[in-house]
């Protein structure tokens, strides 16, 4: 009994000593002196100021680097602009000029000599009845044509003649004309299925100062725009057409009144 009490007392004393030592150690590590805490705060503040100062210097350095890059870029672009010349286009090659020789001029003059230059429409004077029409000049027609109404064939002194009426310009009146028949022609028109036989007579006319006798077919042209059609039988070797032009000629002030049937 005494031995158990003695052992328990020793255990209790050892435990108390251990707790005492543990308490001393804990207070040593958890407790900080006031002067050490103030020094720590001062150090933290100083480090914060250093960080802010470093950030400011970094920002200033970045701005300076940006300005330097901009100035360098501008200098490089200006140097390129000053040194590089603008491209220039080579001069256009001179085109050869086609010159007409004197011989060509003489040949063209010979072809035009004695020929009447006419437009697509010309004043046409019909000798005999003494009527002036606006004639259409058409190189596509082989034979010239005149507007004729009431065409009647008859015989005179053993020859075939024809009597017909021609309209007076700007009037509903008609003038009767008689001529000997030169021949008859067969006309096939694209707008008609059947052919038409027309009487051909010789008539004297004037275009400008040019007077001529030529063959005309007689047909009713009342539905057409022009009473007279001048074809290739007149144009050939006599007239040249100035395409796109009208009334290139002028009739003389004095016009013949009668037709004797002879060419002059």
Image (cartoon, rainbow, N blue to C red):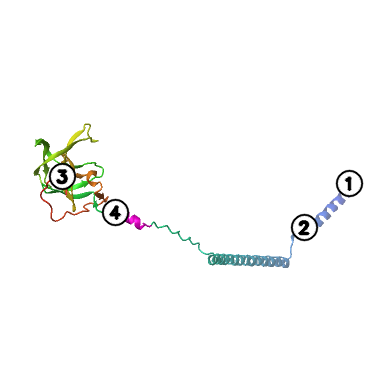
Residue 225: x percent and y percent? 18, 44
Q: Which residues are magenta?
A: 99-110
Helix, strand or loop at mark 1? helix
User: Residue at label 2?
Assistant: 26
Q: Which quarter shows the N terminus?
A: top right
Magenta segment's dominant SS is helix
User: Residue at label 4?
Assistant: 110
Which picture quadrant has residue 102? bottom left
The numbered mark, 1 or 3, whose residue comes first in the sequence reads 1
> Which residue is rendered at x = 86% and y = 50% of the image?
11
Helix, strand or loop at mark 3? strand
Outermost residue, right direction? 3
Residues tagged 1 and 3 counted as in contact (Cβ below 8 A): no
Of residue 101 and residue 240, the one placed in the foreground of this image is: 101
Outermost residue, top direction? 194
The numbered mark, 2 or 4, whose residue comes first in the sequence reads 2
**Spatial separation of the CA atoms under disc 1 and disc 3:** 178 Å
Q: Is residue 152 above or below residue 256?
A: above
**Spatial separation of the CA atoms under disc 2 and disc 4:** 140 Å
Residue 193: x percent and y percent? 23, 31
> Which residue is rendered at x = 80% and y = 56% of the image?
22
Q: Tag 1: Cα neighbours inside 10 Å, few (<14), some, or many (≥20)?
A: few
Look at discs 1 and 3 and give the one toward the viewer. Answer: 3
Q: Which mark is residue 203?
A: 3
**Spatial separation of the CA atoms under disc 1 and disc 2:** 33 Å
User: Residue at label 1?
Assistant: 4
Of residue 2 and residue 200, the one placed in the foreground of this image is: 200
């Amino acid at each position: 009994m005494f031995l158990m009490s003695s052992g328990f007392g020793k255990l209790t004393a050892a435990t108390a000593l251990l707790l005492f030592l543990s308490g001393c150690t804990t207070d040593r590590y958890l407790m900080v002196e006031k002067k050490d805490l103030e020094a720590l705060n001062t150090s933290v503040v100083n480090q914060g100021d250093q960080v802010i100062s470093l950030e400011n210097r970094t920002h200033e350095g970045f701005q300076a680097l940006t300005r330097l890059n901009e100035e360098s870029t501008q200098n490089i672009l200006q140097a390129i602009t000053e040194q590089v010349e603008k491209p220039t286009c080579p001069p256009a090659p001179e085109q050869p000029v086609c010159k007409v020789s004197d011989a060509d001029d003489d040949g063209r003059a010979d072809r035009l000599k004695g020929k009447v230059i006419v437009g697509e429409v010309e004043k046409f004077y019909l000798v005999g009845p003494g009527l002036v029409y606006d004639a259409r000049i058409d190189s596509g027609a082989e034979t010239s044509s005149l507007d004729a109404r009431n065409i009647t064939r008859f015989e005179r002194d053993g020859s075939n003649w024809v009597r017909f009426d021609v309209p007076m310009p700007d009037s509903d009146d008609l003038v009767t004309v008689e001529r000997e028949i030169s021949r008859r022609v067969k006309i096939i028109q694209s707008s008609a299925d059947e052919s038409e036989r027309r009487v051909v007579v010789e008539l004297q006319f004037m275009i400008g100062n040019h007077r001529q006798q030529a063959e005309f077919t007689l047909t009713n042209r009342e539905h057409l725009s022009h009473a007279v059609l001048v074809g290739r039988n007149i144009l050939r070797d006599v007239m040249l057409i100035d395409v796109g032009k009208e009334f290139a000629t002028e009739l003389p002030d004095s016009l013949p009144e009668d037709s004797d049937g002879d060419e002059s």
